[in-house]
Amino acid sequence: MLTQAQQTQITTLIRSGIAALQNDRPAEARDAIQKAIRLGADNAPTWLGMGMACLAMKDYDAAEKAAETSLEREPRNPRAALIKADCLLAKGDKRSAAAYYGAAVRMRPTPEHMTPDLEPELARAETMVKDLAQQFEAHINDRLQPHLDAAPPSARGQLALDILMGRQKVYRPEPHQFFFPDLPIRNFYDEAEFDWVPALEAKTDAIRAELQALLSGSDDQFGAYVTGEADRPHYDSHGMKGNTDWGAYYLWYNGEAVADNQARCPETVAAMEAVPLLFSGRRSPNVLFSRLKPGARIPPHTGMVNTRLICHLPLIVPDGCGFRVGHETREWQEGKVWMFDDTIEHEAWNTSDQERVILLFEVWKPELSDEERQLVTEIFASVDSYESAPSA
């Protein structure tokens, strides 16, 4: 333990070092701080001061070592990360420097802990992150261009480059309720993989006619797509609970036929019965007309389980409608089915002055075996039986 005399001496040395730094005498500052460290002032602020003094002297090795020591004692100190970044950049390691500039930005303190001298330093770090990213991209483009000219990349090869450059982010499945491991990560599936698609697309006109009869009725039969459940907390992360801008008219709801609605749409029901819908207890299938009103937007969100695909048969699609899953954006084409993994972040919009309506339904992911599908069904049935069982 330090004596009172040693503590007083250390305090004097540190103050002397700070004053020397403020008066642009880094060598004097380094000597004072070094003496304080030898006396036992082995803490993050003292090593930070040493790093600042050595950096001002352009002794980059010593400054980097001091910054590392400071970060070991205080891992979320943006000033130490900045010193480390400046040293790496001065030594020519641009990639590592960019990583530490980015780390410093992410360590930004809350407003009440921000000091006037740190704010411009963090702004400088943000600028350095952008500048170094542009330099890196320019280097990669120059280096790769002859290869790309000779052999243009595939769509996924281009996406890999875009992710590397920071032009795209990585999207992964994020189911809210149930995750089945080791399934491929695919935004959209190729409709050619599903032999029932042509027959369903051939029924588009008949299905659309039943939809238009519903829409022309005197009463609006569409309820809000997002309703929540009384026995579950509902966080409404996308702000659509109870909002009929995103409306639904169900033919099957959570595994049960909606008899009155089905009676109004016999052609649609017959077409759906010819599709291998996902039947899984009290959860599936869900089959519905999904309406997006003029000017409406469904914010980015993810679905519940990753064992299914959501399928769309577009029926009424005005100009100005779009849909994004992960990094991939598409426009609906009336009568053309597509299917996607809804546990990957997705969103939809209708910027037109007309309604957009699709037929939405669920099928199993094709990668699941019959045994795995049965297992998932039994898992959900077990969960549901527990929820409905009386208390002991």
Image (tube, rainbow, N blue to C red):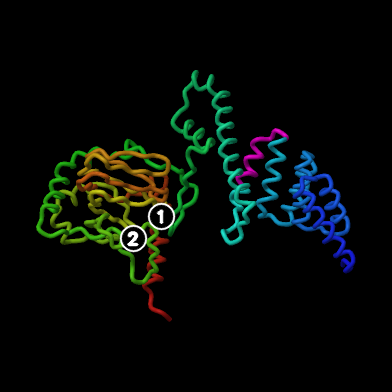
Image quadrant containing the C terminus: bottom left
The quadrant holding residue 114 is bottom right
Residue 108 percent across, percent down from the top left: 59, 53
- Give the spatial CA distance, label 1 vs label 2: 11 Å
* Residue 204 in sight here: yes
Q: Main secondary structure of the magenta part?
A: helix
Q: Is residue 102 magenta?
A: yes
Question: Is the residue marked by circle 1 packed among few (<14), some (14-19), or many (20+) residues within 10 Å?
Answer: some
For this view, does 239 lie left or right of residue 257?
Answer: right
Vertical arrangement, residue 75 with respect to residue 315, above or below: below
Which residue is under mark 1? 305
Q: Amino acid at mark 2?
A: Arg
- Which residues, given as a range, are shown in magenta? 91-103
Q: Amino acid at mark 1?
A: Val
| Contact between labelled residues 2 and 1, with CB atoms less than 8 Å apart | yes
Which residue is under mark 2? 283
Residue 92 percent across, percent down from the top left: 70, 33
For this view, does 366 lie left or right of residue 314?
Answer: right
For this view, does 221 lie left or right of residue 230?
Answer: left
